[in-house]
């Protein structure tokens, strides 16, 4: 479910505003919108994959109370249904207590009809997105940013610091968003709002545990952690069972599959087939067979995916949250998720419960040097040459200031970098695919998000999780059958044996193959090489990613927009392949900026995604207001 809220003290028609907001988030034929006026405003929702759930996530009490829950809530004690039933019937304080006991990725709205007050509760880790604009007696809340701009009350303006983070890290940090005037609701947050006074109070209901730096891998109670994950899985299945597991060759999906099989849940599996020479899909298929998974579906990525309507729809759903061009796994998988699956099992935590969120020791000095692109990199040079001088500098300087403030919230050690990663990369890079994209079609099940589990996991030091030591211990102790097939994680092949000749050969073959493919794709971009290969007819297939969509968007870019350098944009529009690296990166950044604006302006929608490449989209210089 997606949610939208408008309260205003300036005569704004809140009911009409919420109607526009919900319609902007209604992307598929099966989606249904509802708008419910309340004193001083209106609350709306879009019923999406929650319609697959046996548990109603939109509830109305007999006394006029309203409860709307976005995401897939779970409960480790009692049932989700009983918690929600108690909340919608309860007084304001009791309703908050019931909702704070939930786990999983969710954001809940509770309207107390008697007190005429709104409560907003986010999940403990802040995984389920909820965006907010608050100014001059106006409050807007929505599951998606494009709903805020669809309200007609915000201009489509970039937040420079967040776009700087997009360039430097590949994801936004803190609670800033790519849209100016919009912020993201904090994790473990309770907000209470009184429309009559425009007063909002905020509080946190969960805090991170104290770290245990002296802990060793033998000190970790893996059985206790797995019991918690198993209770989470049981709660997910109360929504719908069995679901389809998105199975890779890595740790997370393998552990979920092993748990499901042990619990007698016969889920199907969806595997991305990377080709005959790929260890990832090979070992995913083998472990599915070894663990008794019968219903296995494999699919091969389409070579034209990045010029297809399917990729446009992915961008529409994820709202250009990350640099996704060429991000094969999550983007390609989204095109093969279908409503008839009802639910998919996707990741753990997502990803950091048993593994390090950042694998290198040394605090933020090491992290920033390792992960943040500096202004001397080609990526930033492309930004400075494509965007106006003012906009480019604002992106870079705004990001560096924001980065200093956000990292300053945490200790400058391994636990600090882990906390930063979990509050930023986990929320805004890893989470968007399940909670923002897949959720339009199916219920996304992401175990390992409960407060109970993170009370244990967040205290574990890097020395225990590094090198997959903890993960391997979990499998060796509890699921040795899951180690019957080597694990492919981060491009590395891992086996329970110290040395396996066949694994060594395959791993080195993959390294050589990737090296050759990398340089072959880039050979036509070298001086003289491109023209020489072209005359020989050899560079035609050097890069298998068609650029039809990228070309179309770059051609339609608003060159005279104040954010851009008009002359530089026109040079990018006139450039011919093979492109130099600066031109290639400049076109890519222009693509992201322009497609984001099309989405925020409502010019790219689910209804025109199929014909977008053929449409003559007029260029404009202004924003919608």
Image: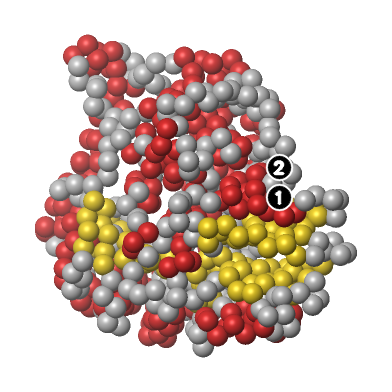
Secondary structure of the residue carrying numbered label 1: helix
Q: Nearer the viewer, residue 521 or 184?
A: 184
The answer to whether one can see residue 471 in this image is yes
Quick check: 290 left or right of 322?
A: left
Q: How many marks?
A: 2
Q: Is residue 14 left or right of residue 587?
A: right
Q: Which residue is mark 2?
A: 152
Q: Are marks 1 and 2 in contact (CB under 8 Å)?
A: yes
On the image, which quarter does residue 301 sit in?
top left
Q: Position of residue 614 (x, y in %)?
A: 42, 26
* Residue situated furthest left in the rendering: 502
Vertical position of residue 537 compared to residue 513: above or below: above
Disc 1 and disc 2: Cα gap in Å? 8 Å
Q: Which residue is identified by label 1?
A: 17
Name the one closer to the observer, 366 or 18.
Answer: 18
Q: Residues within 10 Å of mark 2 (few under 14, many from 20)?
A: some
């Amino acid at each position: 479910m997606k949610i939208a809220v408008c309260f205003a003290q300036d005569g704004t028609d809140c009911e009409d505003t919420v109607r526009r907001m919900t319609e902007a988030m209604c992307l598929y034929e099966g989606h249904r919108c509802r708008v419910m006026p309340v004193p001083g405003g209106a609350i709306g929702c879009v019923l999406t994959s929650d319609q697959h759930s046996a548990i109603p996530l939109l509830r109305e009490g007999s006394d006029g109370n309203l409860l709307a829950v976005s995401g897939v809530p779970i409960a480790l004690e009692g049932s989700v249904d009983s918690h929600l039933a108690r909340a919608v019937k309860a007084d304001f304080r009791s309703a908050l207590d019931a909702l704070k006991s939930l786990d999983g990725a969710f954001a809940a709205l509770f309207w107390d009809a008697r007190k005429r007050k709104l409560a907003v509760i986010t999940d403990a880790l802040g995984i389920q997105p909820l965006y907010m604009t608050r100014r001059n007696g106006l409050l807007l809340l929505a599951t998606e940013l494009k709903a805020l701009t669809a309200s007609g009350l915000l201009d489509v303006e970039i937040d420079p610091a967040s776009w700087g983070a997009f360039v430097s890290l590949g994801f936004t940090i803190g609670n800033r968003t790519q849209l100016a005037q919009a912020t993201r609701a904090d994790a473990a947050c309770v907000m209470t709002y009184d429309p009559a006074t425009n007063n909002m109070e905020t509080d946190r209901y969960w805090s991170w545990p104290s770290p245990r730096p002296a802990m060793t891998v033998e000190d970790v109670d893996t059985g206790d952690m797995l019991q918690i994950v198993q209770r989470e899985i049981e709660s997910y299945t109360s929504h719908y069972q069995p679901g389809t597991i998105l199975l890779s060759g890595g740790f997370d999906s393998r552990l979920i599959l092993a748990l499901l099989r042990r619990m007698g849940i016969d889920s199907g599996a969806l595997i991305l087939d990377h080709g005959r020479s790929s260890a990832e899909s090979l070992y995913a298929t083998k472990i599915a067979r070894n663990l008794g998974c019968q219903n296995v579906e494999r699919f091969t990525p389409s070579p034209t995916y990045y010029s297809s309507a399917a990729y446009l729809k992915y961008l529409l759903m994820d709202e250009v949250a990350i640099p996704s061009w060429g991000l094969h796994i999550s983007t390609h998988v989204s095109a093969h998720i279908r409503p008839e699956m009802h639910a998919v099992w996707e990741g753990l935590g997502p990803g950091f419960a048993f593994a390090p969120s950042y694998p290198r020791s040394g605090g933020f000095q090491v992290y920033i040097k390792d992960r943040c692109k500096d202004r001397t990199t080609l990526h930033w040079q492309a930004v400075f040459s494509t965007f106006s001088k003012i906009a480019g500098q604002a992106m870079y300087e705004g990001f560096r200031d924001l980065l200093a403030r956000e990292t300053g919230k945490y200790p400058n050690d391994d636990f600090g970098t882990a906390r930063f990663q979990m509050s930023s990369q986990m929320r805004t890079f890893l989470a968007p695919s399940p909670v923002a994209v897949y959720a339009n079609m199916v219920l996304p099940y992401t175990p390992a998000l409960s407060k109970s589990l993170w009370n244990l996991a967040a205290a574990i030091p890097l020395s225990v999780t590094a090198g997959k030591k903890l993960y391997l211990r979990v499998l060796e102790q509890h699921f040795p059958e899951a180690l019957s097939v080597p694990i492919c994680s981060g491009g590395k092949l891992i086996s329970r044996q110290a040395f396996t000749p066949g694994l060594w050969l395959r791993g080195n073959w993959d390294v050589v193959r990737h090296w050759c493919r990398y340089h072959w794709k880039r050979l036509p971009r070298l001086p003289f090489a491109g023209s020489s290969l072209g005359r020989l007819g050899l560079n035609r297939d050097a890069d298998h990613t068609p650029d039809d969509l990228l070309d179309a968007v770059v051609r339609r870019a608003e060159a005279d927009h104040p954010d851009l350098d008009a002359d530089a944009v026109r040079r990018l529009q006139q450039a011919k392949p093979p492109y130099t690296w600066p031109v290639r990166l400049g076109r890519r950044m222009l693509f992201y900026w322009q497609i984001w604006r099309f989405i925020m302006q409502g010019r790219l929608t689910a209804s025109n995604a199929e014909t977008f490449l053929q449409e003559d989209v007029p260029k404009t210089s202004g924003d919608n207001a």
